[in-house]
Image (tube, rainbow, N blue to C red):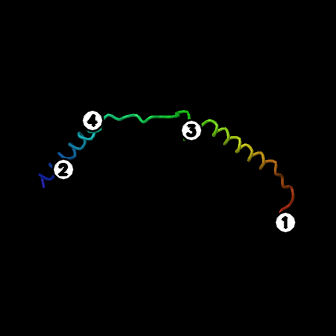
Amino acid sequence: MLMLRKLLAIASVFSMVAAPVAAQATPRQASPVAAKDDLAGIGTFGILISVAVIAAVVLIVSHDKHDHPASP
């Protein structure tokens, strides 16, 4: 039982020491960024079109006045 505890302690210390060393061993490469100004793959033109469509929907809904009662 004592030997098992020592082996588990050695294994846990080794794993805590080996993980950061292994992480630093391989240099990470930065991924190429084609258009970093885009928002989720949508360019400026797409964002402007989206804003125009949302504004048009809001204007259409706000001018649709139903002053008539729901029941006759």
When asked about the image quadrant of residue 1, the answer is bottom left
User: Circles 3 and 4: CB distance less than 8 Å?
Assistant: no
User: Circles 2 and 4: CB distance less than 8 Å?
Assistant: no
Q: Amino acid at mark 3?
A: Leu
Left of 67 or right of it: where is 13? left
Q: Label 3 to label 2, Cα distance in Å?
A: 49 Å
Disc assigned to residue 71: 1
Q: Position of residue 38 (x, y in %)?
A: 56, 36
Disc assigned to residue 45: none
Q: Label 3 to label 4, Cα distance in Å?
A: 34 Å
The residue under label 2 is 8
When asked about the image quadrant of residue 24, the answer is top left
Q: Amino acid at mark 1?
A: Ser
Q: Residue at x 62, y 35 (%)?
A: 44
Q: Amino acid at mark 4?
A: Ala
Identify the mark nearer the N-term, 2 or 4. 2
Q: Label 2 to label 1, Cα distance in Å?
A: 77 Å
Q: Position of residue 8 (x, y in %)?
A: 18, 50
Q: Secondary structure at mark 2?
A: helix
Disc assigned to residue 25: 4
Left of 71 or right of it: where is 8? left
Which quadrant, please, contains the C terminus? Answer: bottom right
Q: Residue at x 15, y 49 (%)?
A: 7
The residue under label 3 is 39
Q: Of circles 3 and 1, which is in front?
A: 3
Which of the pair 54/1 is nearer the observer? 54
Q: Label 3 to label 1, Cα distance in Å?
A: 47 Å
Local crowd at mark 1 within 10 Å, few (<14), some, or many (≥20)? few
